[in-house]
Image (spheres, rainbow, N blue to C red):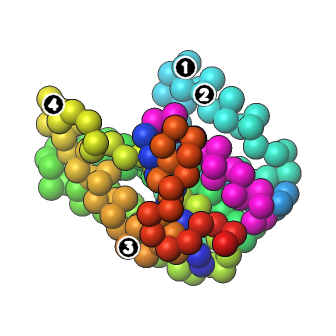
Amino acid sequence: MKIWLITGGARSGKSGYALDRARALGGGEVTFVATGSPGDDEMAERIQRHRRERPESWETLEAPRRPNEALARARHSTVIVDCLTLLVANALDGAASEAQALERSREAVTRTLEAAREREGNLLVVTNEVGMGLVPTAPLGRWFRDAQGAANREVAAVATGVIFLVSGVPWLLAGSKPGD
């Protein structure tokens, strides 16, 4: 499976870029693996808004904690996982120490990459760069920042390409862009 990591800051255009590239690669046959969960009304509305942005023909699998299982049952060869950031946040839920937080995150990412290796096709992984700003003041915030950085590095290490979006502009950092 070809894997692309699509990264950048919040609202930089990552998801839109992934949707466009998935359309080009898979047309109407794309599986979207969603890692968000509606914990409050605002997040529920955000999820609904994102659903409306995707073609109805696309398969959507809700997998906030185990995208590896969704990958295993995805019907299509082009898959988007959106997003790695929420997967890491979900993995950290209830972590009692930095070591536990990092291990839970690593396990979730490793399981996802193992599931991807069992498939043919294209995988677009959307993620956030969260370590480019302030140092979080709370321990859980620092654990998350560090776990997210490690997760991004783990996926980038096996990726066909890494694309960084800034203000909606995709920059190829390594490898190739999806469809090249």
Please say if the residues under marks 2 and 1 sit with CB atoms less than 8 Å apart: yes
**Gap between marks 4 and 2, in whole Å?**
26 Å
* Residue at numbered disc 4: 138
Q: Residue at x 76, y 34 (%)?
A: 52
Residue 46: image tag: 2
Reply above or below: 153 against 171. below
Q: Tell me if 94 is positioned left or right of 21 in this view.
A: left
The reply, left or right, for residue 101 in relation to residue 56 is: left
Tell me the kind of residue under disc 4: Ala
**Residue 171 at x, y = what percent?**
50, 56
Real-space Cα distance between discs 3 and 4?
Answer: 29 Å
Q: Residue furthest top?
A: 41
Q: Amino acid at mark 3?
A: Ala
Of badges 3 and 2, nearer the viewer stands 3
- Residue at image position (40%, 63%) is 109
The CA span between labels 2 and 1 is 6 Å
Q: Can residue 62 be spotted in the picture?
A: no
Mark 4 or mark 3, which is nearer the start of the sequence? 4
Which residue lies under the disc numbered 3? 157
Mark 3 → mark 2, Cα distance in angstroms: 31 Å
Labelled pair 1, 3 in contact (Cβ < 8 Å): no
Q: Which residue is mark 1?
A: 42
Which circle's residue, 1 or 3, is located before the other in the chain?
1
Range drawn in magenta: 10-26
Q: Marks 4/1: CA distance? A: 24 Å
Q: Residue at x 77, y 61 (%)?
A: 24
For residue 143, the mark is: none
Is 19 above or below relative to 133? below
